[in-house]
Structures are given as structure tokens and as C-alpha cells.
Image: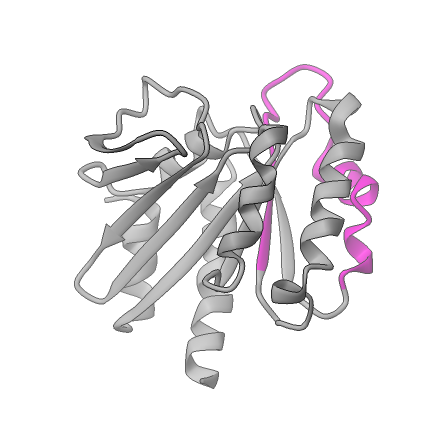
Amino acid sequence: MGLFDKLAGWLGLKKEVNVLCLGLDNSGKTTIINRLKPSNATHLCTSKLFTVIFQAQAQDIVPTIGFSIEKFKTSSLSFTVFDMSGQGRYRNLWEHYYKEGQAIIFVIDSADKLRMVVAKEELDTLLNHPDIKHRRIPILFFANKMDVRDALSSVKVSQLLCLENIKDKPWHICATDALKGEGLQEGVDWLQGRIKVKCFSL
């Protein structure tokens, strides 16, 4: 059973939750999603050129081109996770899905110090977008690749991204090693709590 499957059971709600998974290319988004989803989930991969349904294999991960859509269904909850390509030429696609997003997972490569500024710029653009700015949408940050030597701590990543300035949205950051699955459970626990609170407040 995947972590999202457990999350559905905990919530006990018939609710479809659209989660946007964002971050720069090579940050580990697809690896994280493959860790979170049930092992038998199909995955709909969409780019400007093609649409194909196939069985996602965690051991054969390739960079997402355009975006892929992961749908996980359980008895009580349906998840639609948009894994958006972080390559520069595709980042303008992100904003087309902001309205549907009810939660955001933002993945950072903690070992890529040179592009931390780029990650911050993309995050600032996201937070200031009209479809996000005035909504209390929960944002889960995964400071990924903690297995890489000299990776920055989650505290340092938080400081570089100025997360303390996010006052109008619930957010949380976790140090993760997506290859081993370490740190993901903590993030999912936090996210399920925020979604549960949001669902009951509707």
C-alpha cells in the first residue's frame, strides 16, 4: 500500500484532491511520486506531442517532459497528482493547473546549490500568481537528495528560499532521500492533516 493510499484511509472522506508536484528539473519529483503512489497505479503521461497510458516502474525513472498525471483511487479518496516538468521551457505550463490545485508539493534538490536562486525565483512566481496568491493552499516542501554529500540541511534550504516570509499559507519542509523513501512519511502525515482540516472546514 502506497503512502497516498494510507492517507485516503486516514481521511475517510470521498473527496478528490488535486496535488501539484512542482520543482526544478532533476529535483526528484517523479521519484517521490513513484514512492508515494500505490504499486498498481497507472500513470498518464502527457506532453505537447503525445499521450500514453502505461504502468509506471519506480526503477526506470526518466525526466518528465511536459507533465505527467498520476491518478490514485481508493475506496474513500481520489488523488490527481500533476508532476510538472521543471525544465525551463516547460515551467510556463505550471500556471495552467493552479486553479485545480488543492495542495502543492514543491521539491528542491538540496545538493544543487547553484540553482537554489532559480528555485526561489520559481517559488516566488508561484506564490504571487493570481490563482495561488489569495488562497490558503497548503504547501509541502521536500528538501530532497539528503543522501548526496554536502547537501544543504532543510533549515538552510528554508532560509535560502525565505520560507519564513510565507504568512498566509500553511507550509512545512521535510528533509528527504527519495531513493530510500526517507522523510516522505513525515511530509504525507503533515499534508493529510492539512487536507483533512480543509475538507472539514468546507
Q: Residue at x 72, y 70 (%)?
A: 168
Instruction: Note whether residue 24 is visible.
Output: yes
x then y, percent, for residue 114:
79, 22
Instruction: Note whether residue 170 is visible.
Output: no
Left or right: residue 27 versus residue 185 is: right
x then y, percent, for residue 105:
53, 48
Task: Quadrant for residue 172, please give it.
Answer: bottom right
- Quadrant that contains the N terminus: top left
Q: Residue at x 51, y 34 (%)?
A: 85
Q: Residue at x 56, y 24 (%)?
A: 26
Establish if 112 lies above or below 46.
Answer: above
Establish if 146 lies above or below 1.
Answer: above
Left or right: residue 150 versus residue 146 is: right
Which of these two is toward me, 176 or 160? Answer: 160
Which of these two is toward me, 181 or 67? Answer: 67
> Disc count in the image?
0
x then y, percent, for residue 25:
57, 27
Give the extent of the magenta segment: 139-166
Residue 186 among magenta residues: no
User: Which residue, as the protein is rendered here, is positioned at the far front?
Assistant: 49
